[in-house]
């Protein structure tokens, strides 16, 4: 395979970004929403630090990664300077301290033990409280991450008791085979329930490359989009 020049790659990334923003704009018009209400998080997992730098050059300021170790390696290369790093993948408890140092936002908080570990790590780091989102499992399948809805209120309570964490909203992924709009409206209802306990938890992180229109229609505030911008991922992880 021939080496792709930075200029070629940047042109591809720019085209991808423009195409996704066009989709967002159309979806917003249909839903009678303002596209200024939508934040696009560009998911760079499995792609190199050089891509993150090219995206920064195109004005991207919000990037998502799903693995602490991979994000740390790119951070060590300076990839996230001037960027808000969103951790969107499952976090093992033994990686929580590193996650709490590295991330600007964690979307995948799904159990009290992880809440306590992130809080402890953030306290040790001595930085501002860590914004976190509760990842809700919409089908109750623990393998894919997310708190079952029955345990949601208790997890929210636990987070609210941690001064080193700031509950910023909720995140969800449609169950395999589910109709995305139905899944996202379910998630939006659960988000409203969370706001009764924590009124400032206003972020609704929902929607990826394949289903961002349904997410916009259901009220998403933050979209997490990877392959529609960066291309298909080099390896399955
Ligand atoms: C990879 C990933 C995304 C982005 O998925 P695409 O289909 O590439 O847009 C979004 N959210 C989470 C949790 C992911 O792991």
Image (cartoon, helix red, strand yellow):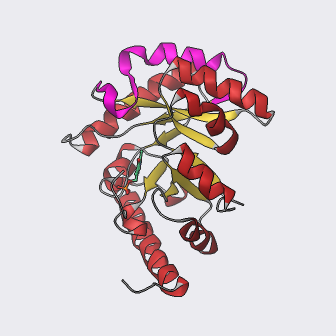
Q: Is residue 210 covered in magenta?
A: no
Q: Is residue 59 visible?
A: no
Q: Quadrant of residue 58?
A: bottom right
What range of the chain is rendered magenta? 140-166
Horizontal arrangement in the rendering, residue 225 relative to residue 74 (left or right): left
In terms of image quadrants, where is residue 51? bottom right
Residue 195 visible, this angle: yes
Horizontal placement of 18 versus 30: left or right?
right
Q: Is residue 63 above or below residue 108?
A: below
Residue 209 percent coordinates (x, y) = 35, 58
Q: Can you tell which quarter of the image residue 95 is in? A: top right
Position of residue 198 relative to residue 105, above or below, is above
Q: Residue at x 57, y 29 (%)?
A: 94
Q: Residue at x 59, y 65 (%)?
A: 60
In the rendered image, the vertical position of residue 132 relative to residue 152, given as above or below: below
Quarter in which the N terminus is drawn: bottom left
> Residue most toward the left?
177
Name the residue furthest front. 1
Exactly how many numbered labels are in the figure?
0
Q: Nearer the viewer, residue 236 or 90?
A: 236
- Give the residue furthest to the right: 126
Give residue 200's position: percent from left, percent from top: 62, 31
Magenta residue check for 155: yes
Residue 222 percent location from the top left of the image: 49, 49
On the rendered structure, is 74 left or right of 185? Answer: right
Which sits in the foreground, 227 or 16? Answer: 227
Q: Residue at x 28, y 37 (%)?
A: 183
Residue 128, x across and y down, in percent: 77, 36
């Amino acid at each position: 395979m021939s080496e792709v020049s930075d200029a070629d790659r940047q042109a591809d990334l720019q085209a991808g970004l423009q195409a996704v923003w066009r989709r967002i704009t159309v979806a917003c018009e249909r839903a009678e929403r303002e596209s200024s209400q939508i934040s696009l998080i560009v998911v760079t997992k499995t792609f190199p630090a050089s891509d993150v730098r090219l995206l920064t050059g195109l004005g991207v300021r919000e990037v998502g990664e799903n693995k602490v170790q991979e994000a740390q390696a790119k951070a060590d290369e300076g990839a996230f300077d001037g960027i808000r790093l969103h951790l969107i993948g499952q976090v093992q408890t033994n990686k929580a301290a590193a996650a709490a140092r590295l991330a600007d936002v964690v979307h995948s908080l799904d159990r009290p033990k992880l809440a306590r570990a992130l809080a402890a790590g953030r306290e040790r780091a001595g930085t501002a409280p860590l914004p976190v989102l509760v990842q809700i499992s919409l089908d109750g399948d623990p393998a894919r991450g997310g708190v079952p809805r029955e345990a949601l209120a208790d997890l929210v309570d636990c987070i609210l008791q941690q001064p080193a964490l700031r509950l910023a909203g909720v995140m969800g992924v449609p169950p395999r085979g589910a109709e995305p709009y139905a899944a996202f409206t379910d998630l939006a209802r659960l988000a409203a329930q969370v706001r009764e306990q924590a009124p400032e938890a206003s972020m609704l992180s929902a929607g990826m490359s394949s289903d961002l229109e349904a997410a916009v229609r259901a009220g998403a505030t933050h979209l997490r989009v990877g392959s529609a911008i960066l291309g298909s991922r080099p390896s399955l992880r």
